[in-house]
Image (cartoon, coloured by chain):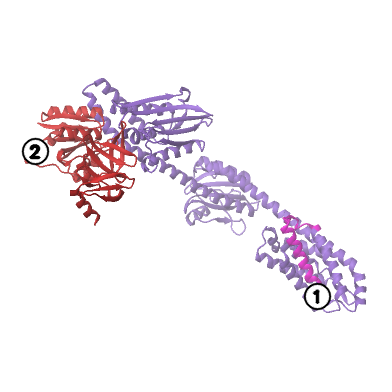
Chain colours: A purple, B red
Amino acid sequence: MSVFVVIAYIYCKSPLFKSLTTDAIRTRDRVYLYFVFSALSIMGTYLGVPVQDAIANTRAIGPVLAGVIGGPLLGTAVGVTGGLHRYSLGGFTALSCGLATALAGTLGGIVHLYLQRGNRSEYTFDPKIAFFTAFVAEILEMAIILLISRPYANAVALVQVIAGPMILSDAVGAALFMSIIRDQKNMADRIAAVSSAKAFKIAERTLNILSRGINPETALALAKIIHKETGVGSVAITDKEKILAFIGHGSDHHIPGNPIASPFTKAAITDNKVIFADGEKERYDCPLSETCPMNSVLVVPLHIDNDVIGTIQLFEPRNKRFLNMNKTLGEGITRLLSNQLLLSRYEMQKNLLVQSELKLLQAQINPHFLFNSLNTIIAILRVDALRCKDLLIHLSNFFRKNLKRGGDLSTLEEELDQVNSYLQIEKARFDDRLVVDIDIDPSLLKVILPTFTLQPLVENAFKHGISNTLGQGIARIKAFRRNGLAFIEIEDNAGIFHEKETEDGHGIKIVERRLKGHFGNDSGVSISCVPNELTRVTVKIPLETKAP
Amino acid sequence: MMRALIVDDEIYSRQELEAMLNETGEFIVSGKCANALDAIQAIHREKPDVLFLDVQMPVINGFELLDMIDQEVMPSVVFVTAYDAYALKAFEENALDYLLKPVEKERLSKTVEKLKKRFREGVKPAFSGSDIKKIPCVHSSRIKLINTAEVEYVRSGETGVYVICQQGEFYTDLTLQVLENKTGLVRCHKQFLVNIDLMDEILFRENGAAEVKTKSGRLVPVSRRYLKILRERLFF
């Protein structure tokens, strides 16, 4: 029995045990398990005590465990192997014992299936299950000996002697073996859990920082987190030329802002590969200071796409071994950060795209409006010079506001100011047939929204609505509160809205994208149209959201 | 002196151009219209020599307006617009000239020279134009645009030209001549055009004339003279 415990312990410490620490058992793992448990089974035969031309043994433990852990196929295979071996040794129980060993494996497999089907696979490594399975398997073996082995009298005599000790020793042996496996497995799980929790913690804390881009300030924050969470001697972050941040031992001579000195770092950047000096086979020799305590280093390049933009480095001093876990962690975090950098660059480019689309849209509209406005103002100059002056001031106000950058934010009041200048000019153009009606809840004037939210919508109302009607044109602009939301409505009485009109739809989409980008999904733009009566575009903004 | 008609949807634009035309001393402004529908009536009524025409106008734009004018009364056309993107199309349509808003005095005097030259040479303005897809009709003080494909027939009477479709009968300012030339409708009588695609059957009468029954069961007279042409169109 003690031999078994020793074997179990040795097994758990060997690399073969790895096949059991993963959750899903693959084909290769099964092969390993087959050999381990077959060996166990055969050993059980040899370690048995010869009794009356038979062998009192612990052969069944191997197949039972193989079956319970790996399923009926593995169990039976191990059983047949152990059984064939026993059969080859001869004796009047050779056949019955061989057969019983094979059946023990199958029985283990049936238990495995039963646990899987019943969704109780967490009991697979329960020593009690191993105990009872081995217990039943041995009873079965005794029964088979009685059934098959002849002369019957000898069989009865044999069973009388070995039944008790064998049933008990096999059951206890299986349970002990299983409990050792389980403990080792739990330990491996715990280590995995601790290191993945650590990785997630670092990931969570660093990703936010990185969305602001990589610079000395964010690099320092990143380095602090990695240093704290991994517990390594020191952490450095560099760009391609110089140190951005350095935390830990040796920070007296590794100073941020200084150029990169280490050949490891230079190699990592030029070759875009991970460099690891473990401190034994390869040593980190600080090029800056004789007294630098650092001895081992991991240098991982940070990259966007395939371009290296810098490195993250983990150091350990002479008196500390560089943990494998920290190596994996360091590489993983860097990969994660690289992905994050790629993502934030993509986001940035997307934003630039939206902004340039917006600018393009503005540029498309303005020349027409400008020339028509100038024409109107020149015409009015003939009859009313004062009004002309007024209109020119509105026109310059309108264009000044248009030149504001697209990424900016404005208050509703500022937006309405631009809209008002626009409306004054349109009113002059269509003096004889345009009515403008503005009704704004004054408490909403300070609401913040992306610049150019209102103007494109009002321009649409004219371009596609009012300028296409023959009779009186009416434009209404309303702003009001409802259910904790601010609503801004832009309405015209033309009742023409063509979804397919790409330019129009495009403009509204850009407005909506920018709104959602700022306020999230509670905001939006919706359009309703009653043909020939009205088109209403509604902008919805959550009021709770505080603008940054 | 040339008789000019100004068509523009902006009031100050009309006023300014009128003032400038008067300053040249070459024009008598015989009318100003705020949209294409008013313009159709005015052109047929006033028969101006020259039309100063804005392109971008509600419902019917400047180009579409030209398609709707009878060749008999077609004036010389000068486009006046802020959108220079239309220049090429304007010349494809044989416009005499193309002015950009705001209009410069010197540029306008060149237009005057072109116009005078044309009148000296006696060139009759002609427009290639395209087919009319939608016929503007008056419907209880609103403008209704009727797809030509939906028109069953057109009749002209003492009170004007009427377009008949499934929804009923609508008055239009377009002439029977324009509709015959610029739509797929076929003349079947001195006063009637019929849509061949919406014909159900032809009923022959004793005196050699006939009647067309439309798909919605309306009867349209066919005179002897046009029955022959109608037969040829239908290949029987």
Give the residue number, with chain letter if any, for mark 1.
Answer: A86
Q: Tell me: residue A121, above or below residue A352.
A: below
Cα distance between the residues tagged 2 and 1: 124 Å
x, y percent for residue A198: 64, 47
Quarter of the C terminus of chain B within the rendering: bottom left
Q: How many marks?
A: 2
Whether residue A211 is visible here, answered yes or no, is: yes
Q: Which residue is mark 2?
A: B119
- Residue A74 image-quadrant placement: bottom right
Dot 2: element: helix
Part of the protein shown in magenta:
A100-128
Kindly report the secondary structure that dominates the magenta region of the rendered protein.
helix
In which quadrant is the N terminus of chain B drawn?
top left
The reply to whether the C-beta atoms of the residues labelled 2 and 1 are less than 8 Å apart is no
As drawn, is A519 to the left or to the right of A456? Answer: right
The amino acid marked with disc number 2 is Phe
- Coordinates of residue A356 in the picture (x, y in percent): 38, 41
